[in-house]
Image (spheres, helix red, strand yellow):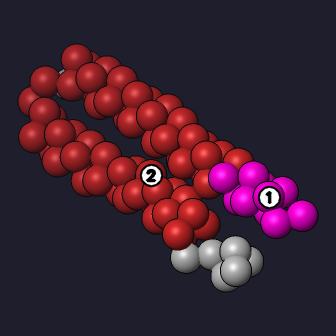
């Protein structure tokens, strides 16, 4: 039974980092694409668009880091493994 817990914990860790990375990748791609479209339509607004895009990318990346932290907690600080 103990091996089943370890297998499920490993699966949960892999799923958490995988979904966090997938979501961050999709969000970043959409954000950069929209920023490029905005700059192409209005080149004079390049500065504010770039600043907002970089701030958004940092926030999206923090979500991916949260997924990494959750997977590390599941693997190394799990109270179920005794």
Q: Depth-wise, is mark 2 or mark 1 nearer the camera? A: 1
Q: Secondary structure at mark 2?
A: helix
Q: Which residues are magenta?
A: 1-10
Would residue 53 be visible to someone looking at this image?
yes
Residue 41 badge: none
Left or right position of 41 against 12: left
The answer to whether residue 6 is magenta is yes
Residue 2 belongs to the span the image colors magenta: yes
| Quarter in which the C terminus is drawn | bottom right
Please report the residue visible at 41 percent of the width from the left and 57 percent of the height from the top.
65
Please give left or right for residue 74 compared with residue 56 in the image: right
| Secondary structure of residue under mark 1 | helix
Question: Of all residues shown, which one is farthest toward the top?
Answer: 40
Q: Tell me if residue 23 can be seen.
A: no
Whole-percent x and y of residue 36? 27, 23
Residue 68: image location, x then y, percent: 46, 57
- Left or right of residue 72, residue 50 in this image: left
Residue 45 position by quadrant: top left
Q: Which residue is under mark 1?
A: 3
The spot of residue 5 in percent (x, y) is 80, 63
Q: Is residue 25 above or below residue 4?
A: above
Q: Is residue 61 above or below residue 9?
A: above
Give me the disc on residue 64: 2
């Amino acid at each position: 039974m103990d091996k089943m817990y370890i297998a499920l914990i490993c699966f949960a860790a892999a799923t958490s980092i995988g979904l966090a990375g997938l979501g961050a990748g999709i969000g970043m791609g959409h954000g950069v694409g929209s920023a490029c479209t905005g700059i192409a339509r209005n080149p004079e607004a390049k500065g504010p668009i770039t600043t907002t895009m970089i701030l958004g990318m940092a926030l999206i990346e923090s979500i991916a880091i949260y997924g990494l932290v959750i997977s590390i907690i599941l693997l190394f600080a799990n109270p179920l493994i005794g």
